[in-house]
Amino acid sequence: MPVRFTEEDLFCPTETALGIIGGKWKGMILWCLAQRTMRFSELHRTVPDITQRMLTKQLRDLERYDIIERKVYAQVPPKVEYSLSKQGQKLKFILDDLEEWSRSYLEEKAAKNETS
Amino acid sequence: MPVRFTEEDLFCPTETALGIIGGKWKGMILWCLAQRTMRFSELHRTVPDITQRMLTKQLRDLERYDIIERKVYAQVPPKVEYSLSKQGQKLKFILDDLEEWSRSYLEEKAAKNETS
DNA sequence: CGGTATCCTAATGGATACTG
DNA sequence: CAGTATCCATTAGGATACCG
């Protein structure tokens, strides 16, 4: 994903958005940060099975696109807090809708599997 | 992505949804089919630069998750139409929101780039 | 027209060790 | 605590040729 967006993005902005929130971990990270501001280590504990490397990488991506904010406290041991930015807050509502859709989707699937 | 969903999915359904609509092409394909039912060749012309292989693969994925429907007309030359399923229709509204978010996001970005 | 099959490259993700 | 660095495995995606 580029930081300067192209004509492609303007042709289908949905694609852009999916590029930003896509991947294996971003949904869950955003979901966590939508609940509350969290430190790196908290995220690491909360997101199941993510490695430090991946967590760092995803957070850097999200920060780069101004979806989250990173606040470093100048202290030892270090403390870094992550939170949703203004854009991230807006995105949260959509992710909520997506979660709701997914729930009903999974329920319907489960019901179908029972009757079949 | 499994067809039988796991406890992981129930822990964070958003992840599931992003797994279904993620990837390079699915957003745009769904966006096309949200406009209207389309034949394979129409999709192929409309989605820029997608290969036949990729288009087929994405359509199979979406069909497998019951997001779209595939209707084959028994005629020569063959005619196959793709459309949104009921679940796909519901998803459409969320993708619309996502598109709107993305537009405002890109606009803000563009504005920032001008002033900087 | 609407696909498959084969082969290949690029991108993503993971394991592990190390550090200010 | 909050990261990097290195190396490796897996997956996504692309080029091309062929088929009913």
Image (spheres, coloured by chain):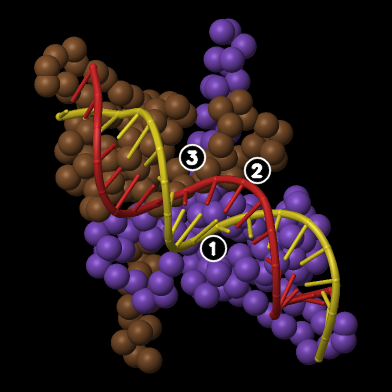
Chain colours: A purple, B brown, C yellow, D red
Q: Which residue is mark 1?
A: A89
Q: Position of residue B71 (x, y in %)?
A: 26, 20
Q: Could you tell me which chain the residue with mark 1 belongs to? A: A
Q: Quote the CA–CA distance across marks 1 and 2.
A: 18 Å
In front: A26, or B74? B74
The quarter of the image holding the N terminus of chain B is: top right
Q: Quote the CA–CA distance across marks 3 and 2.
A: 13 Å
Q: Which residue is mark 3?
A: B20
Choose mark 3 or mark 1, whichever is in front. Answer: 3
Dot 2 amino acid type: Cys
Q: Position of residue B47 (x, y in %)?
A: 24, 48
Q: Earlier in the sequence, mark 3 or mark 2?
A: 2
Residue B7 appears in which quarter of the rendering? top right
Q: Residues within 10 Å of mark 2 (few under 14, many from 20)?
A: some
Q: Could you tell me which chain the residue with mark 2 belongs to? A: B
Q: In screen coordinates, is A74 left or right of B2?
A: right
Q: Position of residue A74 (x, y in %)?
A: 78, 89
In front: B90, or B28? B28
Considering the numbered disc 3 on the image, is that residue within a helix, a strand or a loop?
helix
